[in-house]
Amino acid sequence: MVTFESFGLNEAVLKGIKDLGFEQPSPIQEKVIPYILENRTDMVGLAQTGTGKTAAFGLPMIQQIDTESRTTQALVLSPTRELCLQITSELKLYAANVRGMNIVAVYGGANIQAQAKDVKRGAQIIVATPGRLNDMIRRKLVDLSNVDISILDEADEMLNMGFVEEIDTILAETPATKQTWLFSATMPKEVENISKKYMTDPFRITVGNKNEGASTVTHNYYVVNQRDRYLALKRLVDAHPEIYGVVFCRTKAETQMVAERLIEDGYNAASLHGDLSQTQRDSVMKAYRTRQIQILVATDVAARGIDVKDITHVINYNLPDEIEIYNHRSGRTGRAGKTGVSLSIVTPRDQHRIKSIERIIKKKFIKLEVPTGMEVCESQLFSLVKKVQDVDVDEEQIAQYLPKVYEELGGMTRDELIVRFISIEFNRFLDYYKNARDINASGGRDGRGSANLKRMFINLGTYDGFEWNTLKDYLKDKTGLSRDDLSKVDVMGKFSFFTVLAENAPQVVEAFKFIEFDGRTISVEISDKPDKNTGGDRRSSGGGRDRRRGGDRGKSNFRGDRDRGDRGGRSEGRSDRPKRSSDRSDSRSGNSSDGRYDRKSSDKGRDGGSSFKKKFASKRSDRS
């Protein structure tokens, strides 16, 4: 059996490894460590995320540092703040028994002068993000002229983030005689190019096949219509009661939206994206690591620094734009030899991309059905039974209360007691899911523009004080439909359009027969004009101008941007959603989720106008 001792590591480094409980090197460590120690050359290390690449370059790097010198001898570049901090933390643990070793993290979002002082005190190893280190070079706050080892970690992601110019500037400050080690989970053409640009005849070490996914991760996918994407997410989370996972979204705006909706629905969730301050990010990650947060909703970039043990599931709210990114997402679970599950929510039109990912990662995806409401209830029931079986009982403390408990419950049989105790928790899910519809897509056109949908006209618009979200709530209250039964809400000046299932169209027309708004009769009709929009809900803030909400535009007013095409299913009976019993306050770290309003409305009949408009005008002013 190969051991760390057989590599030729010194006693101080070996003691650090032993203190951490490491016994046997991973495959990438087994190949990289002895090669680096025996050869002075450039090297490319290719292995899946979570296989121990930091220790693979960190242990031999630490051994080669001259602690008698206070000059910077090694430089590690990483794409994100989180990964920079993670690498620094791990290196400090490996070097805990090496006297005189000083390792400093340099990253944006923190005081640059404080970091400069730490470097000036004598940092033999600097771990940095390219942007911040480039800034320090311009200010002449760092000296890289003695660097002997440069490491490009997660090189593919640094390229994706556009750090080519910064890397050029940084490496130009280092000696041409240095060693350069490049590590990556995937090896697209861009990384091939960077290895040629910055390295001389690098030796390549590959563990597994190129771009191959980890063998410890199972890959499943579910096909739903676009409007049911959020409903599918909730079903999957509820069907796995013990989930401790990461939900990946494409943009910052979508990440915030999904996190806020999960929080509103009673889940212990939080978001992690680039618009959060460093303090907020640290708070979120602390809560996630201590499991105060069960579901972390993240962008690909922000999640690159996540190194949390025992993540059970990764959920792709939508597939990444670049196939190689999928490997990084799924690599958050199934780490250190443990098993994990990667779940993907896709629409019928995106199914072909599953085949593309399969070819790249050389792993087979399994198509599964989104669980039915009763299947979710069954999962919750047996999870509750297991909790009862595994609960720790402090018999000494509880003994004083038992006589009174026996007295109160003495009239019930054993079977009655079991049923009642289980029902305390189980009834929430049973009430919510007992009439839940099947949301698995039947294939074809993703439920858009088909004969199963009807476009409706209503003579209410922005002149009546409505926006797309308040009109959708108004329609929901008057018709008895849920928010997921109403989609593509376009609000014009004096009128609006919306889409419903064809089977619900008569119900909508009937509901407004005797309703007035501000003294005039409301008219609702089935529109003759076909809906040619296939991209999701369109909304206007007034004057008939169509605002299309698209990609990630930086900081957004997330509360006012709630119902894009993939949000059509606001919730399954949202107001009746069973709230989790856990304290939700801890899960709001780093998220702007206060100031929400109760969308239930009691105005009926001829009072359909003034009271509703006044109430929502008041609520909107509270949220501004």
Image (spheres, helix red, strand yellow):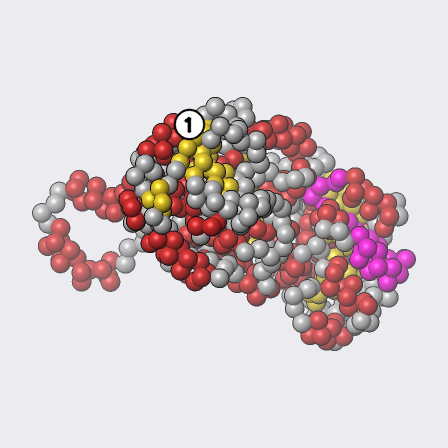
**What percent of the width, then of the height, locates residue 26?**
65, 45
- Residue at image position (40%, 49%) is 265
| In magenta segment, residue 22 | no
Residue 385 or residue 162, whichever sits in front: 162
Residue 40 or residue 442, whichever sits in front: 442
Amino acid type assigned to the residue bearing label 1 in the image: Ala
Q: Name the residue under label 1.
A: 502
> Which image quadrant for residue 370?
top left
Judge from the rendering whether residue 618 lies leftward or rightward of residue 87; answer left or right.
Answer: left
Mark 1 crowd level (few <14, some 14–19, many ≥20, 10 Å Cα): some
| Element under disc 1 | helix
> Which image quadrant for residue 615?
bottom left
Judge from the rendering whether residue 429 lies leftward or rightward of residue 95; answer left or right.
Answer: left
| Residue sitting farthest toward the front | 520
Quarter containing the N terminus: top right
Residue 486 or residue 138, whichever sits in front: 486
- Residue at image position (28%, 58%) is 394
Q: Can residue 262 be seen in this view?
A: no
**What percent of the width, then of the height, locates residue 323?**
67, 37
Q: Can residue 253 be seen in this view?
A: yes
Count of marks, rendered view:
1
**What percent of the width, then of the height, locates residue 136?**
77, 68
Q: Is residue 457 above or below residue 54?
A: above
**What percent of the width, then of the height, locates residue 271?**
53, 54
Q: Write the start and end of the magenta stretch as one range.
A: 164-188
Judge from the rendering whether residue 21 lies leftward or rightward of residue 524; answer left or right.
Answer: right
- Residue at image position (49%, 54%) is 559
| In magenta segment, residue 167 | yes
| Residue sitting farthest toward the right | 176
